[in-house]
Amino acid sequence: CTAHVPLSEMFGYSTDLRSATQGKGELSMEFAKYQPVHRATQEQMIKEFREKQAAGKK
């Protein structure tokens, strides 16, 4: 079974899969392509970046 998923959505998936399959589930990932970020996601990322900069966290 193959799925195309943004990398940001994959963090923690391995742990969830192992938990759901009593450690028997397997997965592999490989880069498929770059794709533009949706406008709302882009605006949220910029907002978070600017907030971190303002707080002195680089």
Image (cartoon, rainbow, N blue to C red):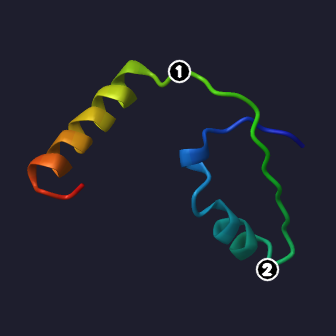
For disc 2, the neighbor class at 10 Å (few under 14, some 14 to 19, many from 20) is: few
- What's the amino acid at mark 1? Pro
Assess whether mark 2 and mark 1 are in contact (beta carbons under 8 angstroms): no
- Side of 11 where 17 appears, left or right: right
Q: Position of residue 26 (x, y in %)?
A: 85, 65
Q: As rendered, which of 30 and 16 lies closer to the eye?
A: 30
Q: Is residue 8 above or below residue 25?
A: above
Q: Position of residue 7 (x, y in %)?
A: 61, 45
**Residue 20, quarter of picture:** bottom right
Q: As rendered, which of 44 and 3 lies closer to the eye?
A: 44
- Side of 8 where 5 appears, left or right: right
**Residue 57, quarter of picture:** bottom left
For disc 1, the neighbor class at 10 Å (few under 14, some 14 to 19, many from 20) is: few
The C terminus - image quarter: bottom left
Q: Position of residue 55 (x, y in %)?
A: 10, 55
What is the residue that sits farthest to the left in this orientation?
54
**Residue occupying the point 78% across, 50% down:** 29
**SS assignment at label 2:** loop
- What's the amino acid at mark 2? Gln
Q: Is residue 37 above or below residue 27?
A: above
- Side of 53 where 36 appears, left or right: right
Question: Of circles 1 and 2, which is in front?
Answer: 1
Q: Which residue is mark 2?
A: 22
Q: Position of residue 1 (x, y in %)?
A: 90, 43
Q: Is residue 53 above or below residue 14?
A: above
**Residue occupying the point 64% across, 60% down:** 13
Q: Which residue is mark 1?
A: 36
**Residue occupying the point 61% across, 39% down:** 6
What is the residue that sits farthest to the bottom in this orientation?
22
Give the alpha-carbon distance from disc 1 to disc 2, as whole Å.
36 Å
